[in-house]
Structures are given as C-alpha cells and as structure tokens.
Image (tube, grey):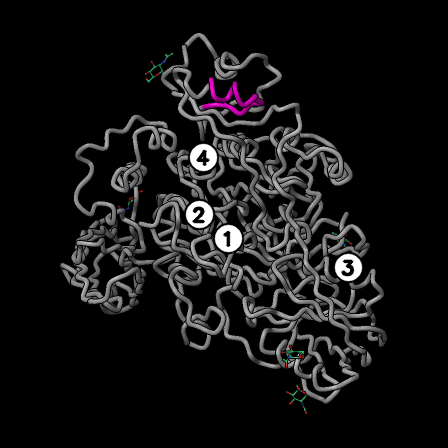
Amino acid sequence: MAPQLNSLPFTTIIFFFFLHFPVLPVANHGLQTFIVQLHSQNMSAALNHRQWHLSFLPCSSRLLYSYHTTLVGFSALLFQDEASALRSTAGVISVHPDRRLELHTTYSYEFLGLGNGNAVARGSNSGGRGIIIGLLDTGVWPESPSFSDSEMPPIPSRWKGVCQSGECFDSTNCNRKLIGARFYSKGHRANAPPGGRAAAAALEYSSPRDAHGHGTHTSSTAAGAAVPKASIFGSGAGTATGMAPGAHVAVYKVCWFNGCYSSDILAGMDDAVRDGVDVLSLSLGGFPIPLFEDSIAIGSFRAVERGVAVVCAGGNNGPAASLVANEAPWITTVGAGTLNRRFPAVVRLGNGSLLYGESVSGSSENGGKRVEGKMVICHRGVNGRAEKGEAVKEAGGAAMIIANSIVNQEEDSVDAHVLPATIIGYAESIQLKSFMNSTETPTARLIFAGTTIGKSRDPAVARFSSRGPSLAMPSVLKPDIIAPGVNIIAAWPTNLGPSGLPADHRRSNFSILSGTSMACPHVSGITALLRAAHPAWTPAAVRSAIMTTADILDRYGKPIMDGAEPAGLFAMGAGHINPTKAIDPGLIYDISPDDYIIHLCSVGYTKPELFAITHRIVDCGERMEKNRMFSLNYPSISVEFGKMEDEILIGRTVTNVGEIKSTYSVRVRPPPGVAVRVVPERLDFGGINESRGYRVWFLSTRKEKGEWYSEGEISWVREGGNRNRVRSPVSAKWAA
Ligand SMILES: *[C@@H]1O[C@H](CO)[C@@H](O)[C@H](O)[C@H]1NC(C)=O
Ligand SMILES: *[C@@H]1O[C@H](CO)[C@@H](O)[C@H](O)[C@H]1NC(C)=O
Ligand SMILES: *[C@@H]1O[C@H](CO)[C@@H](O)[C@H](O)[C@H]1NC(C)=O
Ligand SMILES: *[C@@H]1O[C@H](CO)[C@@H](O)[C@H](O)[C@H]1NC(C)=O
Ligand SMILES: *[C@@H]1O[C@H](CO)[C@@H](O)[C@H](O)[C@H]1NC(C)=O
C-alpha cells in the first residue's frame, strides 16, 4: 500500500543558500600556508629531506609537510615577504599559496547521492582482486558492512601503508578490505577560519574516521563488499556492491569541514604513491587553473609516472561551459550521468493531474500515515536540497516539493530528506505553477513508491556535471568519460543521519548522494577491474580501454541526452562507461610520461613551467614539430583551426590487445565543416602487442569566420567475429 499524504495547501518559498564558506584571509597573525617546490638537484647528500626543507625556514614549527614523491618541496607557514624572498632564492622553483578545494558532491555537507544500481562492473570475474585503490577524501566509517573483509584475499605483500591511530580509530579498524588509513590536517588547521567554525571542528575526528559521510560513500562505491538488503528506509532496496568488490581500500583523509587544502592533498598523494596504491581516486577539486600551479595535476604526474592510475571528478559546475576541473591529460576526468533506477514520488494536484517526481524520503518514516499541513515549494537552486527540507520542517511545513529550474531540466537528484518531500522536473514545475495560478486554494498530495510513470532516457548527462572545453589544456578533450553520478546509494556512517544534517537523528548504513564525486569512484573501481584483468597495461592504456568502448547511445538506442538536447562531447567526453566492453577493447592508445612532456612542450609550456610539473629539466627543442600538439596519442581527438590554417595533420598509434590476428577498418563521421581522410584505412595485426600508426588529415571546408565547434568520430572496427569497435570522439574548433 503506497502511503499517501493528505491534501495540503501550498505556499511558495524561495530559499537562497550559500553553502560554501568564503575563502577567508588567514588568521595566524599574517602567516599563510604556501607550497614551495624545489630543485631536487640542490639537495646536498648530507641532509635528509626534512633538514633540507627546514634550511629554507626561520624555525621548524613553520614546516607543515615535507614532500618527496609526488612533488619535491614542502608546505609551510610564511609571511608574504618571506614568500617573496623565497621566490628569488636559488633552488626554489615556485612558491604558491595553499589552495582550498571542495568535494565534488553537489552539496558538501549533505552530499547528494547516487545508487550504483545493477552493479555495472560484475562483468569481470576478478572483481579487482589484488588491486589497491587509494581514496583522498573525508576518511572512512570502518564499521560499515561495506568494509567487511570476509571475502577478501590477504593484503598484498608489496603494501607499505599504515593504519594510523587517532581519535576513535586504531589499527584494529583496518582489515583485509580496508588495508590503510591516514589523515592530514595541518593545512586545514592552519587555514581554518577562527571562531564560528569551532563547533563544526569539534565534530570532526582527529583521525581517519569519517565525520561527513562523503569518503565512506565514495570508497564503498569504488570497492565496497557486497551487502545484501541494503536500502535507505526501504527505498532502493537491493544488494549494494562496489565496482571492484575484490579490491583493497586505503583511505587518505585530506578533507575536513572547511574543505580540502592542497598542502594536505599533496601529503596524502605523496604517501599513497609510496604506500603502493594502484589507483588514486579524488572526488574533489576546484576551478580550472594552469597545470603548473595545480597541485593535483602536479602530484598526479609523478604518480602516473610510477604507474598509478589517477581518476578525478570533473566538478559540478555544469551546465556552464569550460569549468571542468582536474583536466591534466594524465588524469582520467570523470563527469556524471543518470542511472535507470527511479524513486517515484508523484504529486497529485487538487484537480487530479499527476506530476512525476522522485524521493527516498517520507515513505516508511511516516508509516503510511497521513500528514496534514502546509506543503512548501522550493526552487532547486544549486545547493542544499536537504537543508531546504530542514528549513521547511523547522518553519512548520509538513511536506516539500523541490521544483527544478530550467537549468536542471528533468534531472531528479533525490535526498534522504527529514520530511516527506519530492523533487519534480522543470516541465512539471511549470505545470505546478500554472495550477497554483489557476485556483485560490491550491492543494496537492504526495504519493510515494510503487508508482511507475516511465519518462526517463537513461543514462543521460547530469545537468550539474562540469563541461569542457578545458581551459587549462584545450588541446585535449575533457571530460574523458561519464559514469553514474545521480542518486547513488552507498555506505554511510552511523553517527549521522542519511541527510548529513545535525538535526537528522535517523540512522542508516546507506545514503543517497549525487555529484561527479559519486561518478569518480565508479571509474576508479572499474579501473581496478581492468588493472587486475590486464596487469601489464599502463594507466593510459586502461583509460583508453574505458574511453574507446564507452556508450554513446542510451538504453533505448537513442543518443545520450543532456537536458532536452543530445549530449555533446564537452558534456560526456567519449560517452558513458561500459565496463564489460572496456575489459576487451581490441586496440588501445598508449601514452608514456615522455609523450605528455612533448605535448606540454608543443602547447608552449616554458622550462620552469615544465619543471614545476615534471621535476625534470626539459629541453623542448626538436621535440616539437608542426601540429605536434594534436598528436598526443590520446583516445580522443581535438583539433583547432587557426586563423590562417585550414589543414591539420595528426598521427595516432594503436596497439593490439585483442585477438592475435586481426584486421580493423576505419569508419569516419566527419565533424560538420571538416573533410577527414585517414591513411591507411585498414590496419592488419599479426600478434598481440603489435602497434600500427595512422594519420588523419583534417581540412576545413567552412566558409564562415568566427569561433565555432563541431563534432564527429573516427572508429576502427574489427572485421569478422567479435566486432570490436574502437571509437575516438573528434572535436574541431575554429579560433575566433
Ligand atoms: C640549484 O640547482 C639549479 C639547477 O640545477 C642551479 O642553477 C642552482 O645554482 C642550484 N643552487 C644551489 C644553491 O645549489
Ligand atoms: C503565475 O502567476 C504569476 C503572477 O501573476 C506569473 O508571473 C507567472 O508567470 C504565472 N505562472 C504560470 C506558469 O502561469
Ligand atoms: C490541472 O491544472 C494544470 C495546470 O493548470 C493543467 O495543466 C491540467 O490540465 C489540469 N488537469 C486537469 C485534469 O484539469
Ligand atoms: C548497519 O550494519 C551493521 C552490520 O551489518 C548492523 O549491525 C546494524 O544494525 C546496521 N545499522 C542500521 C542502522 O541498519
Ligand atoms: C605484451 O606486452 C606486455 C608488456 O610488455 C607483456 O607483459 C605481455 O607478455 C605481452 N604479451 C604478449 C602476448 O606478448
């Protein structure tokens, strides 16, 4: 029996929430945290790293962290004039202020969620066995059944990590599933705004224990054990499983109530790479900045050099263009898509019309009882949906409808609201408003669960998912891939309610969140599956397999949508992840760390900028050739016609990882305004690991002037038998 709410009068309230704290100027009497990069050549043999770093500082208490794996240098508290003086000290490469980044859920306290639905990654029989996924996040709730180790193999002997003790956390909290846990709070503490936030700080554990839920959610999405009968108060019931249930988890807690500081993130990455993780998963970031100033780009370069695959959320700044973050070419940048699971919670208007909505709140909580009172309509805005519910409840509202704006279109991100509530799409919100205009006494009721009103085209791009083109590296198409990121159900701490709100006294081992934060660990887990299945593959090969096999059609065989339009490449990258196909891609596009350096040279990075990223003295010199910039062996293709240029030649190399003998032929869908010629049009392979090069000529046929983009694709299709299709999206740009 579906519980129902009685007819309620409407009132409309518009809430404006500003959820993120401003970046405050720092207390500490003018001291500020800086990240200082050094020339590794300058370290005298007599000193250890810490002593060397201290030699740049007036006293040892100023040092936060010494780095030596993902970055050579340190972070420290400095006065502005000291920072300026350091910039001109011999051996110092760069001095950057610490940077505050945020978690990539669409809301940082309640953390919107996604359900991982019918566990897409079950295709691989290894389940990621033997692979270690490191997550930089808010920590972990180790008691969650998702971190049970009963099915887990022993800890790999190469593992060098630790289970760091702290508040309410000790070595007994680790096991064969959760094999490592560390925390980093120096940058956070140095930057924490004084006063007001002390109360929030008091709620945090000074240990790897998760006080927010986000890290517990993301790590269980990546590699959580199978937990039968998981649900949020009955909604979304089923078995919850991470993408790589056989993989081990190591958590690096770098995010706290005030966000995630670069100095802490670098310390976490430094340790994670030395500890021996195979995959690093970062569901956090900021706005795009130049790569040589971006500590995630810098830290991840050296991680990738050491064979660690780095997977990052692209951010939740969509649908505006060019705000995709974590866009370095050596990072797998993940956007969010919708799932096919729905949580119908329909609004029945007083005149009998039904408006489709979704919710996980209000059903079993109210036990089918009727609740009477005012129903409040809230405009969705950008953030804080669960907070809106709390505010409505505090103001005496009995129920809430969240109405999507034109920006959100029909994307319903549901929350574990503290009162009966639903979220309706933009079309429904217009109808709702016109109904309210049509009568003096508008009434409605909410009908939870059991109602099926088909309307969804899944997967679709989440409207909030950040879009390309990349600002920092426009020569590489970003994001790379989309994965489930809307209404994801995963593990949750039991010291806070599933809405994450302090006043929420309900308890659940699971909660539902949305964001590219939730999409990222899906890809991290699938990356672990591929690494277990193909141990010899590089991080670039794994990403290539994921990208070239991605789906561009939804489950109705129609183009994946982005709101009311078919999704473009800057929204979905290569498409929606398909792990079963990714395990067997046929061909891969491999990239070595040196290739990234050549690419940075060709797009004009200076020696110091290159040094900041690679810690190598690079002489670009003859490494550069005409149009070399478009020839990074990336699985997607991005070309730009300059003012005077109407012809571009690029090269690519594919390596056979499929059948010993195989032949592929090319299929081209040229971007409008471009003639494309591929040479050769057939590639013959006589063995595994054989590589074949091909060239592509792009000729602009466009007469108009001015900035413009168009999209196409180049695919290699295997002849006969299993027809692997190796697809590369192509983006063409005409400069203004
Ligand atoms: C540090 O290394 C750089 C580059 O090798 C060199 O130019 C500089 O003189 C060195 N400085 C010191 C103090 O050794
Ligand atoms: C409802 O009425 C308001 C005020 O008259 C008007 O601004 C709005 O456009 C109307 N909305 C619809 C959907 O008819
Ligand atoms: C109820 O009102 C809405 C908005 O005015 C209208 O679109 C709809 O057709 C009405 N339904 C019925 C059954 O009259
Ligand atoms: C969470 O899971 C644990 C272990 O399976 C169980 O003992 C506990 O009752 C669960 N808590 C809730 C609130 O369901
Ligand atoms: C392909 O190359 C990888 C990495 O060099 C190697 O481990 C593997 O054995 C090779 N496979 C074959 C069939 O030669």
What residue does disc 2 label? 532
* Residues at marks 3 and 2 touching, judged by CB atoms closer than 8 Å: no
Q: CA distance from mark 4 to mark 2?
A: 24 Å
The structure residue drawn at horizontal position 69% and vertical position 84%, both measured from the top left corner, is: 435
Residue linked to disc 4: 299
The answer to whether the residues at label 2 and label 1 have Cβ atoms under 8 Å apart is yes
Are discs 1 and 4 less than 8 Å apart at CB? no
Amino acid type assigned to the residue bearing label 4 in the image: Gly
Amino acid carrying label 1: it is Gly
Lateral position of residue 633 relative to residue 499, left or right: left
Q: Earlier in the sequence, mark 1 or mark 4?
A: 1
Q: Nearer the viewer, mark 3 or mark 2?
A: 3
Q: Is mark 1 within 8 Å of ligand 4?
A: no
- Mark found first going from the N terminus, 3 or 4: 4
Q: Looking at the rendered structure, which numbered label has been put on residue 127?
A: 1
* Range of magenta residues: 73-85
Q: Which residue is mark 3?
A: 390
Give percent across and percent down for residue 315.
51, 52
Amino acid at the residue labelled 2:
Ala
Q: Residues within 10 Å of mark 3 (few under 14, many from 20)?
A: many
